[in-house]
Image (cartoon, rainbow, N blue to C red):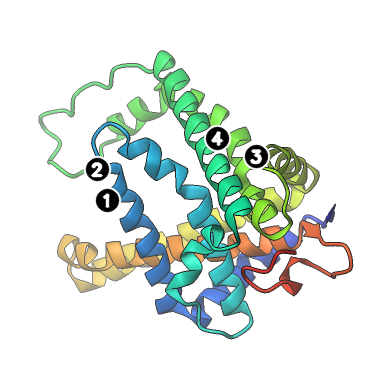
Amino acid sequence: MKLNLVPARTGLQWVKLGVKTFFRQPLAMSGLFFMFMATVSIVSLVPVLGTAISLTLVPAATLGLMAASQEASHGRFPMPSLLISGFRAGPSKTRSMLILGAMYAAGLMLVLGVSALFGTDVPPVAPDVPEGEVSPEMVRNLFANEGLWAAMVLYVPLLMAFWHAPALVHWHGVSPLKSLFFSLLACWSNKGAMLVYFFGWVGVFMLVGLFMSLLTTLLGGTQALNLILYPMVLFMASMFHTSIYFTVRDSFMAEGASALTDSPPGDNA
C-alpha cells in the first residue's frame, strides 16, 4: 500500500462522482445511511455506556457505507449486509475495527471535554423571537462561543486521522494506530484536493438550500418546508457519504493493483 498524490482539481471530481454514484442507487444509499443513523441513535439511548458504544460503531459504519458506494459505482445494488462489512472480515480485522472505534470515541470525547472548558453560556432567546426561528442575535451568540471554535479546531485533525482509517484497516490490513498516521498523512499530502472537495460540497449544500427556499416560497412557506426538509437532508447526507469512498480510493494504491477500487468489498487487499 502506498500513498497516491492527486492534483487539487481531483477534489471536484470526488464531489461529482459522489453525486453520480448516489443517483445510480438513491434509495439504497439513502436507506443504508438511515439505517446507520438509526442504529447509532438507538444504541446511544442505552444508559451510561450508550453514547460511547454508538461512537465506537461509527468507523465500522463508515466503512460499510464506503463498501456500499463501491458496489454502486460498479452498477451493483448495495445490500444491507455491507453495512457490517467491518465485522465480517475475520476476528483479527473485527478486533482492529473495534479498537479503531474505541479510539474514535475516546478522541471525540476528549475534543468535547476540552471544548467545554472554553464554552460560554448562551443567552436565552429573546421574547420577541417566535419559537423555531433564528434571529441575527442568536447567530452572533453562536459564533461568539469560544467552545464552538475550540471544538472545530480540535476536531479537524481528529477527522483527518479517521478519514481513511477504516478503509486502511479493512482493505489494506493496516493496524489501527498506523492507519491513523497514514490517514493524517494522506489528508495533509492531498490537502489541495481535500480543500476543493470540502468547498465543493459547501457549494452544493448552498445551491440546494437556495433551491429549497425558492421551492417553499412557491408551495406555501413553512408547512411546505417541513415536508421536504428532512427527506432532502437525508438525501444530501447520503450523497456526501457516498463520495467519501472516492477520496479513499484515489489516495492510496495497493501493491499490484491500480487503486483501491480493484478490490471488491470485504476482500482482504
Q: Position of residue 262 (x, y in %)?
A: 76, 74
Q: Please report contact status of discs 2 and 3: CB closer than 8 Å, yes or no.
A: no
Q: Quadrant of the N terminus?
A: bottom right
Q: Eyeballing the image, is 225 above or below 5?
A: below
Question: Pointer 4: what residue?
Answer: 103
Residue 210 showing in the rendered view: no
Q: Please report contact status of discs 4 and 1: CB closer than 8 Å, yes or no.
A: no
Amino acid type of the residue tagged 4 in the rendering: Met
Residue closest to the eye, 82 or 204:
82
Disc 4 crowd, CA 10 A, few/some/many (<14, 14-19, 20+): some
Q: Please report contact status of discs 3 and 1: CB closer than 8 Å, yes or no.
A: no
Residue extending furthest front? 91
Question: Pointer 1: what residue?
Answer: 42
| Front: mark 2 or 3 | 2
The mark that comes first in sequence, 4 or 1, is 1
Q: Please report contact status of discs 2 and 1: CB closer than 8 Å, yes or no.
A: yes
Q: Secondary structure at mark 2?
A: loop
Q: Quadrant of the C terminus?
A: bottom right
Amino acid type of the residue tagged 1 in the rendering: Ile
Residue extending furthest top? 117
The mark that comes first in sequence, 2 or 3, is 2
Q: Position of residue 136 (x, y in %)?
A: 30, 34
Q: CA distance from mark 4 to mark 2?
A: 21 Å
The mark that comes first in sequence, 4 or 2, is 2
Residue closest to the eye, 230 or 36:
36
What number is the disc on residue 161? 3
Amino acid type of the residue tagged 3 in the rendering: Ala
Q: Residue at x 56, y 28 (%)?
A: 153
| Front: mark 3 or 1 | 1
Q: Is residue 132 left or right of residue 204?
A: left
Q: Position of residue 25 (x, y in %)?
A: 48, 80
Q: CA distance from mark 2 to mark 3?
A: 27 Å
